[in-house]
Amino acid sequence: MKSTGIIRKVDELGRVVIPIELRNKFDIAEKDPIEIFVDGSSIVLKKYEPNCVFCGNTKNLITYKDRLVCSKCAQKMANLGEKNEDEE
């Protein structure tokens, strides 16, 4: 992990300000959702990107039964349906 040399204090509500330089570098705008991960003893912040529930792809997503699926996985699911119909 690379240190930025930037130190911020946590305020009384538990908030930390992400410096503008880092927000610009990672294309984080006001109101953007941020994911919070724990990696050992570290807290990791990452801009949230919706992804396919099967492969993790973040491009060409569609919603299927309230889940995000990429077009490639949707096509694979459609092909599975065709195979099942052929077997009948």
Image (cartoon, rainbow, N blue to C red):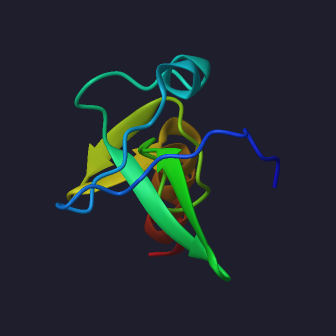
Q: Residue furthest right?
A: 2
Residue ID at (73%, 38%): 4
Residue ID at (22%, 31%): 31
The x and y percentages for residue 85 are 43, 65
Relative height, residue 26 to residue 67 (above, below): above
Q: Residue furthest bottom?
A: 40
Q: Front-most of 63 and 43?
A: 43
In the image: residue 25, left or right of residue 48: right
The x and y percentages for residue 83 are 55, 64
Quick one: quadrant of the C terminus? bottom left
Q: Quadrant of residue 6?
A: top right
Quick one: quadrant of the N terminus? bottom right
In the image: residue 10, left or right of residue 30: right
Q: Quadrant of residue 32?
A: top left
The x and y percentages for residue 79 are 54, 53
Residue ID at (26%, 62%): 14
> How many labels were placed on the picture?
0
In the image: residue 13, left or right of residue 7: left
In the image: residue 56, left or right of residue 40: left
Q: Front-most of 64 and 59?
A: 59
The x and y percentages for residue 35 are 42, 55
Relative height, residue 31 to residue 67 (above, below): above
Q: Front-most of 1 and 56?
A: 1
Residue ID at (17%, 60%): 13
